[in-house]
Image: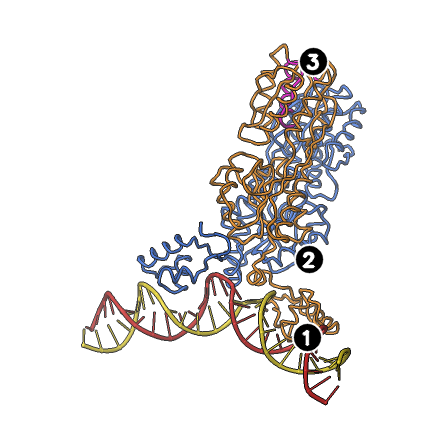
Chain colours: A orange, B blue, C yellow, D red
Amino acid sequence: MGSSLGRRLPVMADVAKEAGVSHQTVSRVLNDHPNVRSETRTRVLEAIDKLGYRRNLVARALVTKHSRTLGVVSFDTTLYGPASTVYGIEQAARAAGYFVSIVSLKSIDRAGVRDALDYLADQGVDGIVVVAPQRSAAQALADLPLGVPTVAVEGGQAGEVSVVCVDQVAGGRLATEHLLSLGHETVWHVSGPSDWLEAEGRVAGWRAALEQAGREAPRPLAGDWSPRSGYEAGRSLASMRNVTAVFVANDQMALGVLRAFTEQGVRVPERVSVVGFDDIPESEFFSPPLTTIRQDFDAVGRHSIEVLVRQLEGGPQERERLVVPPALVARASTARV
Amino acid sequence: MGSSLGRRLPVMADVAKEAGVSHQTVSRVLNDHPNVRSETRTRVLEAIDKLGYRRNLVARALVTKHSRTLGVVSFDTTLYGPASTVYGIEQAARAAGYFVSIVSLKSIDRAGVRDALDYLADQGVDGIVVVAPQRSAAQALADLPLGVPTVAVEGGQAGEVSVVCVDQVAGGRLATEHLLSLGHETVWHVSGPSDWLEAEGRVAGWRAALEQAGREAPRPLAGDWSPRSGYEAGRSLASMRNVTAVFVANDQMALGVLRAFTEQGVRVPERVSVVGFDDIPESEFFSPPLTTIRQDFDAVGRHSIEVLVRQLEGGPQERERLVVPPALVARASTARV
DNA sequence: TCAGATGTTGTTAGCGTTAACAATCAAGTG
DNA sequence: CACTTGATTGTTAACGCTAACAACATCTGA
């Protein structure tokens, strides 16, 4: 259809000639300029159709200074959380008429984030969403006012940029209070890596709930989000007689904990109750089905684009901070003492 | 640093003036043109550094006709397989000096894929990778020779484009033969959705292995990749006395099967052996740890970029077809009869 | 010493689009 | 009827870069 080999693609001037108008009129039609006679408009549209013309967005971007492309920087999009968030971002961005260019970092350090931001800025993105769940990433944002509007997702108090995140502290509270309400004396915790803001927030929520109930907070066991680290924490916990309730900082580690308990003959929820975090699709089918805290990643992605687009289209506003509440999903891994 | 408010970003001409040369010389330095006096080069680089100049890739793309951006079309990047593949693609592309623009489809139908391809073509991508695991997506490729080099991932015999995929048939064989070798009379199968090429390949491998061993192939149970559908298939299987071995088309469904078996008191692997597919990070910690077929998604992503870049940089070559072999990972969910 | 080759730099002309301004024409207004 | 107003269209000039060619200096070898 018009793109046979060797012939160059039609440009605006070709359409103009075909329709017997100037290229500027073609541009006007394409940009929905009001002052074009409807008869002319029709003629132009017919010419466009006939030639199979598609406008060159690169040339357009050069003159308008807007590429209608948004950059996304994320950490390991293989993980469920980042993957879901990026998915939400991508859907929302496309719905808003933006392309999405993605950089997935293997490890998030200050230099890595900085490079990624430079890389995207070079490409001419109009705005950037940084999924910055680690303290180091959030810091990298703090000292980079690079002229491109930026929104941080899960970024804590990330300097001057707007932030969209799930209320991790509330999530930690929710999990802990649920366990306490079932009559458990105290709640143990398997945490995420200490440089992750999410891990920190969950610890804080857990600690706050225990404190408020006047309970002693045991020493948390540190994991790295992987099922294996949960498994190892689980083995430790299984050997302790006084453990009756565990809040694990994500579902994958919770799976490892469950596995360790099964191996050691520790029954869940009869002897120990377990709560996870994330509500990954698998959790419902763990043995036993896992009580967990659901994060609405999709909403986070959508909101981050909303905030960013608002900044792009409405000039420089106030720094926003949008918090999405988490929710408890009660299943069979928790029970009364 | 140089980007204080209100002042416009430096362009090549600014650097040229600063260094006392013509803008073309600056361009030569930036493009590593050989014929530039090293003293001049140094002077230009200093000017670039001093002004904080970054070249405008949009303007460059307009004249070179290359954006150094690759498009990726994928289906639901929330799933582990697509997410891992896209991750591999992104890493490989960046290593090769390309940006990546992603479109994640909610559902893959012909129109959706077509729109996504048009969308990316408009943006001026140099090449496209389509993760096309469904028959409908592969078909959409077949009739779209849009002038942009394209590679299909998991795309079967996708028309004129090159294809990179995991050998699903071999995977199905591997799983089935493993079970037969443990002494099982026959192997049941929980399949993926019938319009997925991967599901089809796994069924074919399973059937071929059974046939080769002279065994009767039971009627496969159809799932939709979700743990829930596996759970439902598992309940059916649990009620059948003669089932001793099940090959499930992915790990998530296998989790559902395990859950159903646990609920019904069917012990794995004592009474029934179960094999999954994918080797998601969780599988090792299922109860029991799942024997499964590992797909090297990362390699698939890398290879797809290699093939694409080869096409981009070496002119139009032969259509390639690259097949990545799967591997059996034996764990505790399978045992001798 | 001079013709020719080679290295180094500058000048000019696009790439395909939008923005700014000018030009034209019909319709209203006093 | 001259004069403003608004709608419609065309002309010209950017946007920031690379490609092509021209210009000059320098180095060869006879």
Q: The disc numbered 1 marks a residue on which chain?
A: A
Q: Distance between the residues labelled 2 and 1?
A: 30 Å
Q: Name the spot of residue A241 as percent of width and height, x first.
A: 63, 10
Q: Does the magenta run of residues contain A81?
A: no
Is B271 on the left-hand or right-hand side of A76? right
Label 3 packing within 10 angstroms: few (<14), some (14-19), many (20+): some
Which element carries disc 1, helix, strand or loop? Answer: helix
The chain under label 2 reads: B
As shown in the figure, which amino acid type bears the numbered disc 2?
Asp
Q: Residue D1 occupies which quadrant of the picture?
A: bottom right
The correct choice, above or below, for B271 with respect to C9 in the image is above
Q: Chain for mark 3? A: A
Which amino acid type is marked by label 1?
Ala
Q: Which region of the structure is painted magenta?
A: A243-268
Contact flag, marks 2 and 3 (Cβ < 8 Å): no
Q: In which quarter of the image is residue B249?
A: top right
Give the labeled residue for mark 1: A19
Dots 1 and 3 on the same chain:
yes
* Disc number placed over residue A271 in the picture, else none: 3
In the image: residue A207, left or right of residue B239: left
| Residue B143 numbered mark, or none | 2
Residue A245 among those drawn in magenta: yes
- Which one is nearer the viewer's eye here, A91 or B135? A91
Image quadrant for the C terminus of chain B? top right
Disc 2 is placed on an element classified as: loop
Total number of numbered labels?
3
